[in-house]
Image (cartoon, grey):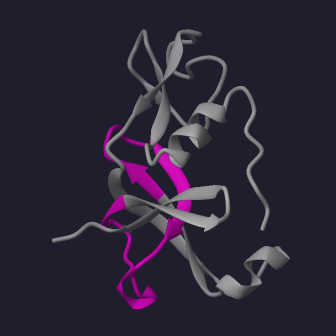
Amino acid sequence: MPRPEPDELTRFFWDGVSRHKLLIQRCQDCGYYIHWPKPVCTKCLSANLAPSEVSGRGVLYSYGVAMQSFHPGFADKLPYIIAVVELEEQKDLKLVTNIVDCPEAEVSVGMPVEVVYQEVEEGLTLPLFKPLGP
């Protein structure tokens, strides 16, 4: 399976995920969340940015079902749901992820979801999303 290669901008995100915390870069001047991390705020151009823990709740913005593996490391996981989740903290704050613990027939755009952390192989934990409980 391909592994993320954290760099100076993204290391905080992956370190947080390994501790089961969803950290998103946030401008300390205007409060805007930025994902994927950038060196300056896309709203006010400030460089005063820091990781901020978010709730891990959101809605399913879009999804597709992978039926064919793009990499040999995913061949045994087919089919799986690739999703874009919009986090509740801010309009258009989106994360690319997978939906788990939900049959494909029950997946729908707009459904409430929450983060779950899954160790997919030794030393690699991913933030995935499942339907929000009742």
User: Residue 123: x percent and y percent?
Assistant: 66, 56
Residue drawn at the location 43% of the way across and 13% of the way down:
28
Name the quadrant containing residue 65: bottom right
Quadrant the C terminus occupies: bottom left
Q: Decide whether residue 93 is among the magenta residues.
A: yes
Residue extending furthest front?
122
Camera-nearest residue between 62 and 53: 53
Quadrant the N terminus occupies: bottom right
Per the rendered image, the range of residues in magenta is: 85-114
Residue extending furthest left?
134
Q: How many marks?
A: 0
Residue drawn at the location 57% of the way across and 64% of the way down:
119
Say if 80 sits above or below 20 in the image.
below
Residue drawn at the location 77% of the way across and 81% of the way down:
69
**Left or right: where does residue 57 sit relative to residue 129?**
left
Q: Decide whether residue 105 is among the magenta residues.
A: yes
**Left or right: where does residue 99 sit relative to residue 112?**
right
Name the quadrant containing residue 52: top left
User: Residue 89: x percent and y percent?
Assistant: 32, 39
**Left or right: where does residue 63 sit relative to residue 8?**
left
Say if 130 sits above or below 102 in the image.
above
User: Residue 46: x percent and y percent?
Assistant: 55, 9
